[in-house]
Image (cartoon, rainbow, N blue to C red):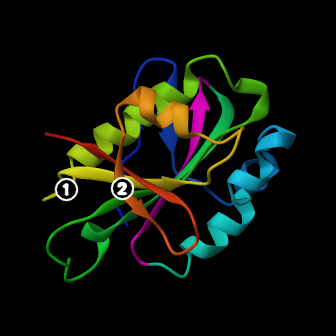
Amino acid sequence: MATANVAVPEVSLQEITASTVRAVTDLQVAPEQESYVASNAVSIAQAYFHRDAWFRSIHKGDELIGFVMLRDSTLLTPAPAPAQLSLWRFMIDRRFQKAGLGRKALALVVAYARTRPGVTAIHTSYVVGPHGPMEFYLSFGFRHTGEVKPNGEVALVLELA
């Protein structure tokens, strides 16, 4: 698994360790958002069964504010072609939402994606609903692909070129 930490002023993505995992699993989205994203505990557990999972805690300075998890096919050996990178989970704790920190963290994810060999886009999907993340992703530059996943989620893509 790639181990480099990535940072911009104020916000950083950091490896989750034995001493930080409990705090990461304690993070919570707003109550009306709970049906749109899996818990961080479930996400971290799933990551340990996927060799292509890349996950980090999101920090503002020294303060833990969120969690991100990607599926990065370039982590597999051998890596399949074409390379694919998907934003699998992304959450900012309810106490830190609406402050532009999610946008800064997502910019770090884009910076990471640009370092991955052969990756030309970031794929993601969202659950449709009044408190879902669609507007956030569209305002960041993602666009609809026209695909609806078997689980009902709507697919988005952000081209990196």
Residue 11 percent location from the top left of the image: 51, 26
Residue ID at (24%, 50%):
121
Badge 1 local density, few (<14 within 10 Å), some, or many (20+)? many
25 left or right, relative to 106: right
Query: What residue is rendered at 83% in x and 41% in y?
Result: 32
Question: Where does the image place residue 63, in percent across and percent down from the top left?
Answer: 68, 28
If the image is split into quadrants, where does the C terminus sit? top left
Q: Is residue 129 above or below residue 138?
A: below
Question: Which residue reaches farthest front?
Answer: 146
The residue located at (68%, 54%) in the rendering is: 37
Q: Is residue 35 left or right of residue 9?
A: right
Amino acid type, mark 1:
Val
The count of marks equals 2
Could you tell me residue 95's position as x and y percent?
A: 79, 27
**Residue 46 visible in the snapshot:** yes
> Label 2: which residue?
146
Q: Residue at x 20, y 66 (%)?
A: 83
Q: Which residue is mark 1?
A: 119
> Which secondary structure class fits the magenta region best?
strand
**Sequence order check, earlier mark of 2 and 1:** 1
- Report if the CB atoms under discs 2 and 1 are less than 8 Å apart: no
Q: Is residue 52 above or below residue 132?
A: below
Position of 50 compared to 147: left or right?
right
- Callout 2 amino acid: Gly
Q: Which residues are magenta?
A: 51-61
Q: Nearer the viewer, residue 18 or 93?
A: 93
Q: Is residue 69 above or below residue 94?
A: below
- Note whether 23 is above or below 60 in the view shown: below
Residue nearer the viewer, 121 or 2: 121
How far apart are the two marked residues, 2 and 1, measured between alpha carbons? 21 Å
Element assignment for label 2:
strand
Q: Quarter-wise, where is residue 42 in the image?
A: bottom right
